[in-house]
Image (cartoon, rainbow, N blue to C red):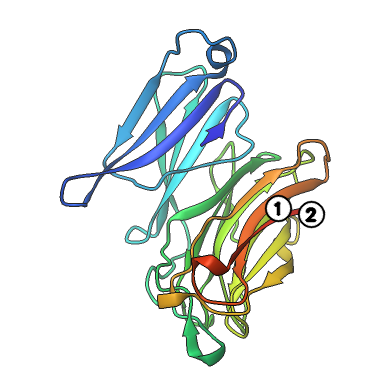
């Protein structure tokens, strides 16, 4: 779910009876009608060419959303203005990534990325730029999975930068992102490898294209069957213009769901 200036937006994937992906759907509801409890005018759009669509945070009067396409080495980018009935689309070429090799071992050779993939999980619009984040497997020169990042000029749709977040010591995965009220970009994500999975937050320097991150908590154990989750969110703080609110989790005292410790973190630039 996301909001633009005029609409509430919802997106989901549709699967057939054999559990095979069929299409993606976007629905929008006018905020004015929702506020007044009037009969709601729903508009929807479907595509069979792109799935797991990710809305930007900070949309303004146009909702931007995207999907990754590893085979075409590109982003599938879409725009649906509040004032329009039609969706526009573009294919944006970016540096290739790896949608396999999500291999990261914590202490005791405990895996934690066995369910990871390259769906876009973080997206934002701020200061004339669009940004998108997703998880990549290992590539040459980067020995651990990492976060792919692409920022685009909102008007020309040209790639401005690719400020990936990676480490020679461990893996980064499952990013979420949002601009605060001043347009700075904040991050919520997971890091692991030398340690069990840890939750971290960060801020992007859009001039230097470098992330500054800080760990909020580290798990005491790795997950059963090596399956971690995404379940991270980053949003601008409601009242503090320089801050964000981020969610995440760690495992404390054991390996299963009973040991999940949810986290809500307020941080600032």
> Is any part of residue 129 visible from this angle?
no
Figure check: 204 above or below 80? below
Residue located at (61% from left, 23% from top):
5
Asked if labels 2 and 1 touch by Cβ distance under 8 angstroms, the answer is: yes
Q: Is residue 103 left or right of residue 192?
A: left
Horizontal relation, residue 205 to residue 110: left or right: right
The quarter of the picture where residue 118 lies is: bottom left
Q: Which of 92 and 33 is in front in this view?
A: 33
| Pick the front one: 97 or 1 | 1
Q: Quadrant of the C terminus?
A: bottom right
Kind of element beneath mark 1? strand
Name of the residue lying farthest toward the bottom: 108
Q: Name the residue tied to disc 2.
A: 267
Picture coordinates of residue 56, whole percent (x, y): 56, 41
* Position above or below: 192 against 231: below
Of labels 1 and 2, earlier in sequence is 1
Residue on which the image places disc 1: 186
**Secondary element at image label 2:** strand
Residue found 39% across the figure and 48% down from its top: 52
């Amino acid at each position: 779910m996301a909001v633009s200036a005029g609409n509430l937006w919802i997106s989901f994937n549709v699967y057939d009876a054999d559990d095979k992906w069929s299409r993606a759907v976007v629905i929008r509801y006018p905020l004015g009608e929702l506020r007044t409890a009037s009969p709601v005018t729903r508009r929807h759009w479907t595509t069979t060419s792109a799935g797991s669509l990710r809305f930007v945070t900070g949309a303004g009067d146009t909702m931007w959303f995207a999907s990754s396409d590893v085979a075409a080495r590109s982003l599938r980018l879409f725009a649906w203005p509040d004032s329009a009935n039609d969706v526009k689309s573009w294919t944006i070429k970016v540096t290739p990534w790896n949608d396999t090799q999500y291999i990261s071992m914590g202490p005791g050779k405990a895996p934690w990325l066995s369910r990871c993939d390259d769906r876009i999980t973080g997206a934002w619009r701020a200061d004339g730029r669009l940004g998108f984040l997703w998880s990549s497997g290992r590539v040459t020169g980067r020995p651990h999975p990492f976060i792919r990042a692409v920022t685009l000029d909102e008007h020309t749709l040209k790639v401005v930068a690719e400020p990936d977040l990676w480490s020679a010591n461990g893996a980064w995965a499952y990013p979420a992102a949002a601009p605060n009220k001043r347009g700075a970009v904040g991050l919520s994500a997971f890091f692991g490898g030398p340690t069990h999975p840890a939750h971290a937050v960060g801020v992007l320097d859009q001039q230097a294209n470098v992330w500054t991150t800080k760990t909020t908590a580290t798990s005491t154990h790795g997950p059963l069957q090596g399956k971690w989750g995404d379940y991270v969110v980053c949003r601008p703080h409601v009242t503090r213009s320089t801050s964000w609110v981020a969610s995440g989790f760690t495992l404390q005292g054991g390996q299963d769901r009973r040991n999940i410790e949810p986290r809500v973190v307020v941080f600032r630039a």
